[in-house]
Amino acid sequence: MSNSLGTPGTALAVANPWAVVPSLGNLDAYISAVNRLPMLTPQEEQEFARKLRTENDLEAAGKLVLSHLRLVVSVSRKYLGYGLPHGDLIQEGNIGLMKAVKRFDPDQGVRLVSYALHWIKAEIHEYILKNWRMVKVATTKAQRKLFFNLRSMKQGFKDDSDVQTHRDSLTDAQIDVMARELNVKREEVIEMEARMAGGDVLLDPAPSDDGEDAFGPIAYLADASHEPTARIESHQRDVLASDGIAAALEQLDQRSRRIVEERWLKVNDDGSGGLTLHDLAAEYGVSAERIRQIEAAAMKKMKKALAQYA
């Protein structure tokens, strides 16, 4: 079998699927490579998923994974604010993607991209939960020194009645002394004290006893507006609101089209709309009820045209 990628929209024809993807050690090359990998058509996706499910075809599994690596890159970007390496986030997301491919059922009527999002995010969340606090608490030699000396220095301040003025928190003078002696910024002393004084926050809490999902920070730390499915849906709405409506209007006769435009699409500079039913009735020499009937028939025809356009 050939080791070429083929052209976009065609099946991935590779004997060793991972041979076409650079190592994550060169992140830019990796991202560039996965963005060039062709996407599978729905038919190809169904074919490979069934081969994997019925025949345990690992080559089919590789093709499904390869075609969705760009999804992992896109999702992982939303979690860069934790200070964790982008390559590690991608690697964890890839594990989630492979789990999704293994469990994907092509007969459920959903695309793999929608199903895989849950597994990708779940693996990234788990990685963050295990590593974020440890990485953020002490990343440099000076910060590690601060981490291990903060408590003892605070205790020394407490024993000094001339300096200690607060029971728990550090004073500005104490912060300056600690920053100078440990060779860190005073802002780092303040942040470290706050982090060590507070407990860990569960980013993804378990459901409550009443069965309802608990709300945790993980729900709003990721920017949902940049999820691939949300962007696709947004794009589809934009297309329907512009090209779709224009195509639907083309299906109407001149009178019906003008009635719809005046009643629903026209907005004047002062914010007011177009003509009323009575205005249009007077213009066409019919009753307002007749204008309403024409409008209803036109809207029904447009709805059918929009459904076909979508």
Image (tube, rainbow, N blue to C red):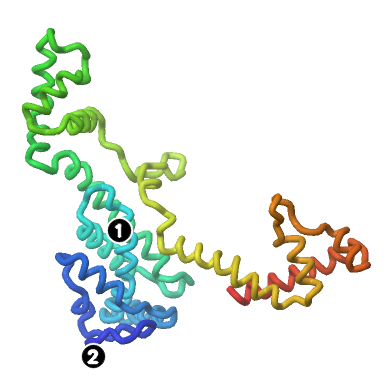
Q: Which mark is residue 2?
A: 2
Q: In the displayed orientation, state which residue is furthest to the bottom.
A: 1
Q: Quadrant of the C terminus?
A: bottom right
Q: Position of residue 243 (x, y in %)?
A: 59, 72
Question: In the rendered picture of this protein, how many numbered marks are placed on residues?
Answer: 2
Q: Quadrant of the N terminus?
A: bottom left
Label 1 sits on a secondary structure element that is helix
Left or right: residue 49 versus residue 291 is left
Q: Identify the image quadrant of residue 181.
A: top left
Q: Which residue is mark 1?
A: 76
Q: Identify the image quadrant of residue 143.
A: top left
Q: Position of residue 254 (x, y in %)?
A: 78, 75
Q: Position of residue 20 (x, y in %)?
A: 21, 78
Residue 203 seen in render: yes
Left or right: residue 9 versus residue 299 is left
Amino acid type for the residue under numbered disc 1? Ser
- For residue 167, above or below residue 17: above
The answer to whether marks 1 and 2 mark residues whose Cβ atoms lie closer than 8 Å is no
- Which one is in front, 290 or 276? 276
Instruction: Give how far apart the Cα atoms at labels 1 and 2 are.
Output: 31 Å
- For residue 168, above or below residue 141: above
